[in-house]
Image (cartoon, coloured by chain):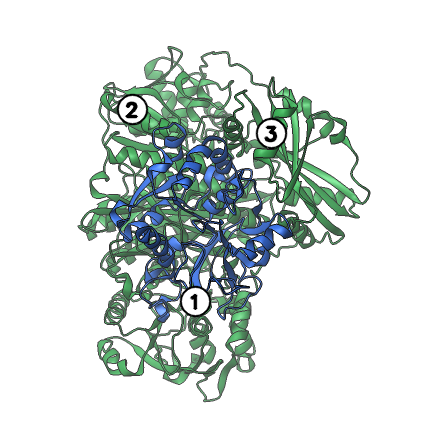
C-alpha cells in the first residue's frame, strides 16, 4: 500500500527555498510571480503500515514540530487531488524510475530506528505552490528551467501516480548469453555496430577485434565487446596522446615536419624523467601523482574533468565529478586521505539571451548554478575543503561547459604502492550497482548534440556523498591495519575497467551474480559496465577477509566478495556459472592498434587592431571595466558556498584581507596539526591565448600557476604540476596541432622551471553540433600546481597592510596586450600574447622567494589577467588602503613609439609580481633583488584614494578604492 | 579531577566530518579522546557514561537528509536516550558544534525539557544557501547582573570579550518554538552567544549569517553543562587559522576557539 506524506514550513516561518525559486523566476523574466512555497513529498510503500505508524514517522522523523506541519493519507486520498487555491498553481517533481533517490536510505534508517521493522520503500518528491498570474507557457518555462531536469526527474501527475509507481515494479532478469556477430561483418557494418552499441571504436579498432576473434574462431560475447570498448576508450587509455602523429608546423615562414610517437611520453612525461626529482614518488602510473611531503608522509594530487555529464545534468554531473576524483585519491597506492578539493569551471556567458540559446542546451547560468551546487553539496558533505579554483566565461563554452575537479590527499609513505597476488579476493565495497552511468567512458568520446540528452541519459549519474564518506572512513581504518593489498576506484567503465586493470598482470575471475544490486533486472553486461557511483574494489588476502568485513559492517558499509585473482593472465567473468567473458589480458591491454593522426600548426592570420582613440581613453573607466570582466571579478558567491575550512588546516583562505574578501593567489593548508609544514595549491588557465599560439598559452598557464605559489611565500624547490587538456575534436589536424604545440610548451616550461608533471588527463571531442554548424571549445589547458611550504608562519597574503609601505613591481613589462582582458573590453585583437624568457623567470621566482623567506615582504600579488592595474587595485582595496603609483618608474621593455600608459597598465606579461615592503627594509630588499629587473613604483596611502600617474605626469587613473571594489564585486553578486 | 582522567567521546557516524579537528582541540589541552561510532553504543559495545565529555561534532550526519541532524536526533531519541540520561546524571558535559548542535536541538536535549520535547529548531539560512564566513560572537547583555563574572555555561567561563569564529552551514537559523520559549531562554540566561559586529553591536546579515531570531548563535541547558553552537570553535585553535593573521591579528595567547574547550576542561578539573 502507498502512503503519501506532505511536509511544509508553517505559514509564519520563512521558506528560503521558495524565495530562491521566485528570485530565479523573476530572473527568467517571469515577473508576474508573487510567491513560491515548497512542499516536501514522501511516498512510502509497505504492505502493512498503519496510519498510527505513519503518524509517528511524520512526527518523530519527517517533520520538525517547531517550524513545520505535515499531512498524510493514502496515496489516492481525495485531499491530495484538491484543486489549487485560486491564484495559485502547482507543480510536482519526482525522480525518474531507476534514478537513485538520495534520501531513501536515510529515511529508511530513521524508520527502522523508530522501531518499525516493516520493509518500506521510500520515494521523495517536491510539490511547488506558485502564486501569480502565470500563463501555461510561463509555468512550463519555470518548471523546465528551474524545477526539474528531465534527464533525472519528471513532472508528477497525481491522477496517474500510482500507475507510474507500480509500473516500475522490479522485473526479474532471464539469463541469456549474448554473442555479437562480427566475424562476418563488412567494414561498413563494423562501424555501424560500433555506433549502434555506443562503443565509440574506430574501424581500425573494430578490425583488430575481428582479427583477434578470427584467430579464436568465435564471435565475442556482448560483455567482451563492451569490456574492450571501455578499456580502449579515449577516456581510459588516451589513445590520441599515445598514438602516432604526423605533425607539420610553420614557424618563421618555414614548414617543418615531424613524426611524433606517443605525444605524452615524448613531451610531458619525458620532462619529468629528465628532471629526475628524488621527491617524486609515483608519477603517471597510479590514480594520482604522488610526491614526498615530509619524513613520514607523501601527498598526492589528481584533477579530473567531468564535462559531458555536467552539460546534461549540471548538479549530478559536477557532484559525481568531485566524487570520482576523491575516489581516485582514495584509490592511489593503498589509499590517501583527501585533504583539499579544487574546482575550475568554464561556462558560456551567463547573460546570454534565452532566444539565442541553441536547441537542446541548458542556459549557462543554470549550468553554473547547478555545477556550483553539485560541487558544494558533494564536497561539503565529504568534509573536504574546496579551497582553490577559477571560473572562465566564453561563449564557446555554451554547448560544452568544462568542469575540472581536483583532490589532494596525504598518506603515510609506506602506503604509496599496491600489489595484487593470485589467490586474493576481489572485494567490491560501497554503493550498490544499478543501471546508472552506463556507457560513461565511451560517451565522453562523442560530440554532444541536442539528441544527447535522450541518447545518453543513462550516462548521467547521481551521487550520494554519504555513501562515499562511509567508504572513506572505513577504508582508511582498514588500510592502517594492513588488511588489503591493492585498491582502485570504480570510475569510467565500472567493474570492467577497475577489475580488469587490477588483474592486468596476473588474471582475475569474477562472479557477477555476487555483486549487490540496487534492484533486480540487470543483465550481466549491465552489472559489469555500470558506472554506479561510490564503489571501490580492493584485493584482500584470505586470512584478512573476516576482519576487514567486520570493519565495514561496524559502520554499515556494504562489501561483497565478487571474485578472485588468478594466475591465468585472463579476464574471466561468470554469471551463475556461465562464462560470459574470457579475454586474454595481453590483448585487452596491449591489443589496441596505435592511432595514427595528422596535426598541423601555423600562426593565425589575425589582423592587429589596436584600441581606437587611444589618447583620449579614460583609463579609470577601463580599469573599472576590466575589474568587472567576468573572468576577473570576485567569485565570492561561489567561494562562500564551499566549506573551505573544514578539517581545520586552512592557513591562507581563497578570500582574505581587511574585510576577508580580497582575492588570494594560492590556497595554503597545513595538513598536520603538529607540524608547520604546509602545501600551497594554485592553478593557471587562460584559453584566450590559445587562439594565437597554444605554445605560449601553455607556458603562460605554467608561469601563472607557479607565480601564485611564489606570491604566497612558496619556492620552486618542490613544486609538482598536473595537466588537464580539454580540447575540441582532435581528429581535425588543426585542433591536434594546437595540442601538440601546447604539449611542447608544457615540456619546455617544465624543464626550464625545474617543475615536473606528475599526473594528467585529457578530455577531447568537446564540441557541440547545432544544426549544420559546430561550436568547438577553445583549447583549454588547466595547470594545477602544488608546492611545499616549509613554514606556514611565513606565508604572505596579497592584501595591502600599512600606509607608508613601499610598492615594488618585480619583472619587466612588455607590449603584450594580445588576447588580454583589456583588449577584450576594447574589442581589439593582436598577436602579441605574453611570452617568457625562462632563465629570467626562474631568477625572478627564486629571488622573490628569498625575499619572502627573509621576511621582507608584507604583501605580494602576481600580475595576471588584467595586468598591473588589476593587481594594484586588488591589493589596495583588499587592504582597505589607498595607493599612489607613478608609471614613469616602471621597468619595461617597450619600444618608444609603442609606449603608452594603457600598455603599462594592462599588458599581461609573465613573471611579474607586485610586493609591499616596509621602508626600513628598502635597501635590504633592493640588494637581494639586484640581479633582476624591479622598480619602486609607489607607496600605500592612509586614505582611500587610488592614484596612478601616467608617463606624461598627469593622473592616468584616479578613484576611490570603494569604487574599484564595487566594480570587482558586483558582476557575480547573485 | 585530573586532566589525564578526563575521557572525551567524539561521537561519529555516517557523514561526521569535524571529528579529527575536534580531537586535536581536546588533545591539545591534554584530555584523552576517543572517536567512536554511534553503532558501538547502539549495539551496546560501549556506553556513553564511560566518558566525562561527549562532543557532537560538525558534519552532515546521514547526509542531512530530511533536515540537518534530523536522522541522528531520531536515533539518539529512539536508541540512546537511556545512556545519555545516565551520562547526564553523572554530571557529564556535552558540546554540540554545528551539526552536533542541530542534533541536540532536534532531540530536545537543548534547550532541554523533562521529556526531551523539542522547543526550538535550526531552519534554512535566510539567504537560502550554505555559507562559510567568520562571525563575531558576544554574550548577551544580561538583564540582571547577578551572574556577572560567572557564567552559567561552563564552556564559556572567563570569556569576557567578543570572540571571532567561522560558521559553515546551510541550516543554522535559530528559531524558538514561541515567545515564551524565547523569553525563558533569555531570562534564564541560557542564550550563550549572539552574532554581532566587530563593535559588539547586534546587526543584520552577514554579521548574523543565517537570520537567527534574537541573533542567537549558541545556547546551553539549565545546568550550563550542555552547550551547543553553530560556529566552529575547533577551527580556531591555531593563530594561522584566523583569516587576518597575516595582518597581525590573532596575536593573543589563546585563540578564541580554544578558549571554549579550555573552559569546559578546566571546569572538570576544578570539579
A259 on left or right of A223: left
- Chain identifier of the residue bearing label 2 in the image: A
Location of residue A545 with respect to A706 vertically, above or below: above
* Badges 1 and 2, same chain: no
Location of the C terminus of chain A by quadrant is bottom right
> Label 1 neighbourhood size at 10 Å, few (<14), some (14-19), many (20+)?
few
Q: Nearer the viewer, mark 2 or mark 3?
A: 3
Q: Which of A125 and A359 is in front in this view?
A: A125
Badge 2 or badge 3: first in the primary sequence: 3
Question: Is residue A928 toward the left or the right of residue B257 in the image?
Answer: left
Residue on which disc 1 sits: B161
- Label 3 marks which chain's residue? A
Please report, as a chain letter, where disc 1 is located: B
- Gap between marks 3 and 1 measured at Cα: 45 Å
Task: Locate residue A776, reporting x and y percent.
Answer: 51, 48
Q: Chain in green? A: A
Q: Is mark 2 on a helix, strand or loop?
A: helix
User: Would you name the residue on which mark 2 appears?
Assistant: A585
Q: Position of residue A887 (x, y in %)?
A: 41, 82
Left or right of A111? Residue A406 is: left
- Residue A504: x percent and y percent? 28, 27
Observer able to see residue A445: no
Is label 3 in a helix, a strand or a loop? helix
Q: Which residue lies furthest to the right in this view?
A: A86
Amino acid at each position: 500500500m502507498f502512503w503519501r506524506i506532505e511536509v511544509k514550513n508553517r505559514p509564519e516561518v520563512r521558506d528560503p527555498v521558495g524565495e530562491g525559486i521566485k528570485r530565479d523566476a523573476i530572473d527568467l523574466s517571469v515577473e508576474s510571480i508573487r510567491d513560491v512555497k515548497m512542499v516536501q513529498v514522501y511516498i512510502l510503500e509497505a504492505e502493512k503500515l498503519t496510519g498510527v505508524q505513519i503518524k509517528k514517522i511524520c512526527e518523530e522523523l519527517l517533520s520538525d514540530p517547531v517550524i513545520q506541519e505535515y499531512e498524510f493519507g493514502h496515496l489516492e486520498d481525495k485531499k491530495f487531488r484538491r484543486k489549487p487555491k485560486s491564484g495559485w498553481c502547482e507543480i510536482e517533481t519526482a525522480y525518474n524510475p531507476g534514478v537513485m533517490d538520495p534520501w531513501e536510505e536515510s529515511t529508511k534508517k530513521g524508520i527502522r530506528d523508530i522501531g518499525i521493522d516493516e520493509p518500506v520503500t521510500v520515494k521523495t518528491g517536491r510539490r511547488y505552490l506558485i502564486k501569480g498570474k502565470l500563463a501555461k507557457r510561463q509555468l512550463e518555462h519555470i518548471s523546465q528551467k528551474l524545477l526539474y531536469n528531465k534527464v533525472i526527474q519528471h513532472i508528477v501527475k497525481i491522477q496517474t501516480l500510482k500507475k507510474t509507481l507500480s509500473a516500475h515494479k522490479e522485473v526479474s532478469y532471464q539469463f541469456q548469453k549474448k554473442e555479437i556477430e562480427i566475424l562476418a561483418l563488412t567494414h561498413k557494418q563494423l562501424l555501424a555496430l560500433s555506433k549502434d552499441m555506443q562503443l565509440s571504436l574506430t574501424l581500425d579498432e573494430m578490425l583488430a577485434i575481428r582479427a583477434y576473434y578470427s584467430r579464436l574462431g568465435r564471435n565475442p560475447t556482448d560483455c567482451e565487446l563492451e569490456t574492450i570498448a571501455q578499456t580502449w576508450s579515449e577516456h581510459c587509455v588516451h589513445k590520441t596522446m599515445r598514438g602516432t602523429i604526423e605533425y607539420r608546423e610553420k614557424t618563421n615562414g618555414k614548414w617543418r615536419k615531424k613524426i611524433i610517437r606517443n605525444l605524452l611520453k615524448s613531451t610531458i612525461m619525458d620532462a619529468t624523467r629528465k628532471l629526475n626529482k628524488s621527491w617524486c614518488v609515483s608519477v603517471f602510473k597510479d590514480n594520482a601523482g604522488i610526491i614526498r611531503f615530509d619524513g613520514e608522509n607523501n601527498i598526492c594530487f589528481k584533477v579530473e574533468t567531468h564535462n559531458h555529464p555536467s552539460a546534461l545534468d549540471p548538479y549530478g554531473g559536477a557532484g559525481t565529478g568531485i566524487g570520482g576524483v576523491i575516489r581516485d585519491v582514495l584509490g592511489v597506492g593503498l589509499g590517501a586521505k583527501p585533504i583539499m578539493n579544487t574546482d575550475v569551471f568554464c561556462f558560456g556567458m551567463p547573460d546570454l539571451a534565452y532566444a539565442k540559446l541553441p536547441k537542446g542546451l541548458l542556459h549557462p547560468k543554470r549550468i553554473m548554478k547547478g555545477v556550483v551546487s553539485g560541487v558544494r553539496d558533494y564536497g561539503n558533505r565529504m568534509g573536504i575543503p574546496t579551497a582553490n579554483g577559477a571560473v572562465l566565461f566564453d561563449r564557446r563554452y555554451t554547448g560544452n561547459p568544462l568542469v575540472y575537479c581536483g583532490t589532494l590527499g596525504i598518506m603515510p609513505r609506506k602506503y604509496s604502492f599496491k600489489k595484487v597476488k593470485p589467490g586474493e579476493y576481489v572485494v567490491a565495497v560501497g554503493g550498490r550497482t544499478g543501471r546508472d552511468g552506463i556507457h560513461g567512458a565511451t560517451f565522453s568520446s562523442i560530440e554532444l548534440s541536442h539528441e544527447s540528452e535522450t541518447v545518453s541519459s543513462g550516462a548521467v549519474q547521481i551521487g550520494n556523498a554519504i555513501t562515499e564518506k562511509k567508504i572513506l572512513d572505513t577504508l582508511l581504518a582498514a588500510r592502517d591495519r594492513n588488511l588489503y593489498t591493492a585498491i582502485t576506484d570504480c570510475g569510467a567503465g565500472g567493474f570492467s575497467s577497475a577489475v580488469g586493470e587490477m588483474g592486468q598482470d596476473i588474471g582475475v575471475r569474477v562472479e557477477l551474480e555476487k555483486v549487490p544490486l540496487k534492484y533486480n533486472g540487470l543483465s550481466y553486461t549491465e552489472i559489469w559496465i555500470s558506472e554506479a557511483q561510490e564503489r571501490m574494489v580492493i584485493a584482500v588476502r584470505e586470512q584478512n577477509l573476516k576482519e576487514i568485513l567486520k570493519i565495514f559492517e561496524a559502520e554499515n558499509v556494504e562489501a561483497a566478495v565478487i571474485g578472485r585473482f588468478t594466475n591465468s593472465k585472463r579476464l574471466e567473468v561468470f554469471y551463475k556459472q556461465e562464462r560470459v567473458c574470457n579475454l586474454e589480458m595481453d590483448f585487452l591491454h596491449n591489443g589496441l592498434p596505435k592511432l595514427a593522426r595528422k596535426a598541423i600548426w601555423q600562426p593565425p592570420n589575425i589582423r592587429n587592431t589596436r584600441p581606437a582613440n587611444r589618447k583620449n581613453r579614460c583609463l579609470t573607466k577601463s580599469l573599472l571595466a576590466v575589474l568587472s570582466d567576468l573572468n576577473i571579478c570576485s567569485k565570492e558567491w561561489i567561494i562562500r558556498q564551499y566549506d573551505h575550512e573544514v578539517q581545520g588546516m586552512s592557513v591562507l583562505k581563497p578570500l582574505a584581507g581587511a574585510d576577508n574578501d580580497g582575492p588570494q593567489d594560492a590556497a595554503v593548508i597545513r595538513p598536520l596539526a603538529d607540524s608547520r609544514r604546509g602545501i600551497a595549491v594554485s592553478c593557471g588557465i587562460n584559453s584566450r591565448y590559445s587562439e594565437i599560439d597554444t605554445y605560449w598559452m601553455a607556458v603562460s598557464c605554467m608561469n601563472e600557476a607557479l607565480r601564485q605559489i611564489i606570491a604566497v611565500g612558496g619556492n620552486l624547490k618542490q613544486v609538482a604540476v598536473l595537466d588537464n587538456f580539454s580540447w575540441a575534436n582532435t581528429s581535425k589536424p588543426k585542433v591536434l596541432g594546437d595540442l601538440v604545440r601546447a604539449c611542447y610548451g608544457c615540456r619546455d616550461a617544465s624543464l626550464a622551471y625545474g617543475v615536473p608533471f606528475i599526473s594528467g588527463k585529457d578530455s577531447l571531442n568537446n564540441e557541440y553540433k547545432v544544426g549544420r554548424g559546430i561550436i568547438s571549445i577553445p583549447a583549454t589547458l588547466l595547470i594545477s600546481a602544488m608546492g611545499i611550504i616549509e613554514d606556514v608562519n611565513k606565508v604572505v597574503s596579497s592584501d595591502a597592510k600599512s600606509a607608508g609601505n613601499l610598492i615594488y613591481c618585480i619583472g619587466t613589462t612588455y607590449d603584450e596586450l594580445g588576447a588580454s582582458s583589456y583588449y577584450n573590453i576594447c574589442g581589439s585583437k593582436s598577436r602579441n600574447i605574453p611570452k617568457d624568457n625562462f632563465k629570467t623567470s626562474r631568477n625572478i621566482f627564486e629571488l622573490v622567494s628569498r625575499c619572502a623567506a627573509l621576511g621582507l615582504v608584507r604583501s605580494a600579488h602576481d600580475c595576471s589577467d588584467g595586468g598591473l592595474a588589476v593587481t594594484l587595485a586588488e591589493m589596495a582595496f583588499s587592504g582597505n588602503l589607498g595607493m599612489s603609483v607613478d608609471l614613469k618608474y616602471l621597468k619595461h621593455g617597450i619600444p618608444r613609439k609603442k609606449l603608452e600608459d594603457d600598455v603599462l597598465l594592462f599588458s599581461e606579461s609573465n613573471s611579474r609580481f607586485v610586493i609591499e615592503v616596509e621602508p626600513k627594509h628598502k635597501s635590504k630588499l633592493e640588494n637581494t633583488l639586484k640581479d633582476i629587473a624591479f622598480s619602486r613604483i609607489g607607496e600605500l596611502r592612509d586614505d582611500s584614494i587610488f592614484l596612478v600617474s601616467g608617463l606624461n605626469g598627469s593622473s592616468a587613473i584616479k578613484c576611490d578604492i570603494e569604487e574599484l571594489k564595487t566594480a570587482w564585486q558586483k558582476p557575480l553578486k547573485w | 579531577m585530573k586532566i589525564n582522567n578526563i575521557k572525551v567521546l567524539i561521537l561519529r557516524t555516517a557523514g561526521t566530518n569535524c571529528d579529527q579537528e575536534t580531537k586535536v582541540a581536546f588533545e591539545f589541552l591534554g584530555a584523552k579522546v576517543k572517536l567512536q561510532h554511534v553503532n558501538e553504543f547502539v549495539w551496546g559495545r560501549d556506553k556513553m557514561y564511560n566518558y566525562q565529555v561527549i562532543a557532537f561534532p560538525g558534519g552532515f550526519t546521514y547526509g542531512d537528509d530530511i533536515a540537518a541532524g534530523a536522522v541522528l536526533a531520531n536515533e539518539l531519541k529512539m536508541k540512546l536516550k537511556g545512556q545519555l540520561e545516565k551520562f547526564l546524571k553523572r554530571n557529564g558535559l556535552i558540546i554540540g558544534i554545528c551539526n552536533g548542535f542541530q542534533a541536540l536541538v532536534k532531540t530536545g536535549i537543548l534547550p532541554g525539557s523533562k521529556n526531551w520535547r523539542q522547543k526550538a529548531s535550526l531552519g534554512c539560512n535566510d539567504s537560502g544557501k550554505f555559507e562559510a564566513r567568520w562571525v563575531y560572537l558576544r554574550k548577551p547583555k544580561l538583564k540582571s547582573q547577578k551572574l556577572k563574572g560567572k557564567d552559567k555555561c561552563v564552556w564559556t567561563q572567563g570569556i569576557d570579550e567578543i570572540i571571532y569564529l567561522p560558521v559553515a552551514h546551510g541550516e543554522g537559523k535559530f528559531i524558538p518554538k514561541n515567545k515564551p520559549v524565547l523569553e525563558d531562554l533569555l531570562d534564564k540566561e541560557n542564550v550563550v552567544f549572539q552574532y554581532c559586529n566587530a563593535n559588539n553591536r547586534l546587526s543584520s546579515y552577514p554579521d548574523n549569517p543565517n537570520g537567527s531570531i534574537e541573533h542567537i548563535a549558541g545556547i546551553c541547558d539549565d545546568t550550563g553543562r550542555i552547550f551547543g553552537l553553530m560556529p566552529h570553535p575547533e577551527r580556531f585553535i591555531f593563530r594561522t587559522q584566523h583569516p587576518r593573521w597575516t595582518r597581525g591579528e590573532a596575536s593573543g595567547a589563546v585563540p578564541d576557539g580554544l578558549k571554549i574547550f579550555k573552559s569546559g576542561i578546566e571546569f572538570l578539573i576544578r570539579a
